Image (cartoon, rainbow, N blue to C red):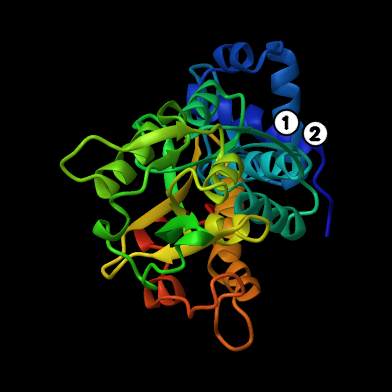
Amino acid sequence: MSSVSSGHLRRLEYFVAVAEELHLGRAAQRCGVSQPTLSQQIKVLEDELGVRLLERGTRGISITPAGRILASEAPLLLDRISQMQEMVRASSRVVRVAYSKSGAPLQHAMVRNFRTENPRYEVSMKSSGSESNIDLVRSGAVDFAFVRPPVDAADVQVSVVRTDELVAVVPSSHSHLPDRVSVQDIADLPIVMWPRSTAPGYYESIMEFAAPGGAPRTVLEEPDYIYVAVAVAAGEGVSFMDLSSAEWLSRGNDVQIRPFQRPAPKVELAVAWRDSLDHQLAARFLRACRQYGTTRYTRERIGTNGRSETTGRRPTQSVRDHDHTRDHDRIHDRP
């Protein structure tokens, strides 16, 4: 099998230009070469293929039957080669990721899974809030950003990679609370939260649930989940977060997790990216995040007896069986 050199590809590009322009002068100008050079390269291509591609006459040029076949197929081949070259270049690029301060351990684990499955990529990470992360994606400062829906992101792509229960995190001194609480069970407790500005939509959706029809009882705001958990452990009040974050934070803090009565509210973790980003890369990143979010994390956090290592309770049906890879959110590799 003969090899394909850059010269072969260049001659194909020259021929496509001639076939589309039907004028050697315009085709040469389009390709950035002189007309004699273009004519000579087309003749080399004809010799390589062993067929005549152009008919040259006093009235100009015309395309032969063999030339029409090549003119039809060559653009497809050149486009495919261009895509392949972009994929190869992308395989060694640095992927820039912004993670949200809410649920950071899970997000780091998802990115680690991406690194494991795609070792040719280098990854750099920075932390910020969901609102700032969307701006980082818009500006091109990062390739992917973890965000907490709902977000105002009509101009970027957003896809959910994990869904968790919203749970209450209470001081250990409140062990008298039922295993599954209602909003009324904790209505007298002050609320400890992170600043609304970091994720306005997420913050408001939680507050609408936690304080329906009334002013939120927020008495303390902390910069991120770790400080929120410390404040709750100190008896400052109750907080609300996704089950994954609550289980991780409860390891080193004197707090207890209380899921809500069914139907329990849900919170989502999503990834945002620009539509102009390489679709193969986007598909790989989302696949790695969803794979970890739906299998490995759950398996690591649930003991052999089926009970949560942190809470001592069995995971709820919605967390255990939820399908996070919804068809309308999937991105398939494009050829």
Q: Residue at x 52, y 31 (%)?
A: 133
Label 2 packing within 10 angstroms: few (<14), some (14-19), many (20+)? few
Q: Is the C-beta separation of discs 2 and 1 under 8 Å?
A: yes
Residue 203 horizontal side relative to residue 285, left or right: left
Quarter of the image with the N terminus is: bottom right
Q: Position of residue 148 (x, y in %)?
A: 44, 43
Residue 276 horizontal side relative to residue 238, left or right: right
Q: Is residue 271 positioned above or below 328 on the image?
A: above
Q: Nearer the viewer, residue 259 or 15?
A: 259
The image quarter in which residue 92 lies: top right
Label 2 element class: helix
Q: Nearer the viewer, residue 287 or 209?
A: 209
Q: Position of residue 91 (x, y in %)?
A: 74, 45
On the image, numbered disc 2 is attached to which residue?
A: 7
Q: Is residue 93 positioned above or below 302 on the image?
A: above
Q: Which mark is residue 10?
A: 1
Q: Position of residue 106 (x, y in %)?
A: 61, 55
Q: CA distance from mark 2 to mark 1?
A: 5 Å
Label 1 element class: helix
Q: Which mark is residue 196?
A: none
**Amino acid bearing label 2:** Gly
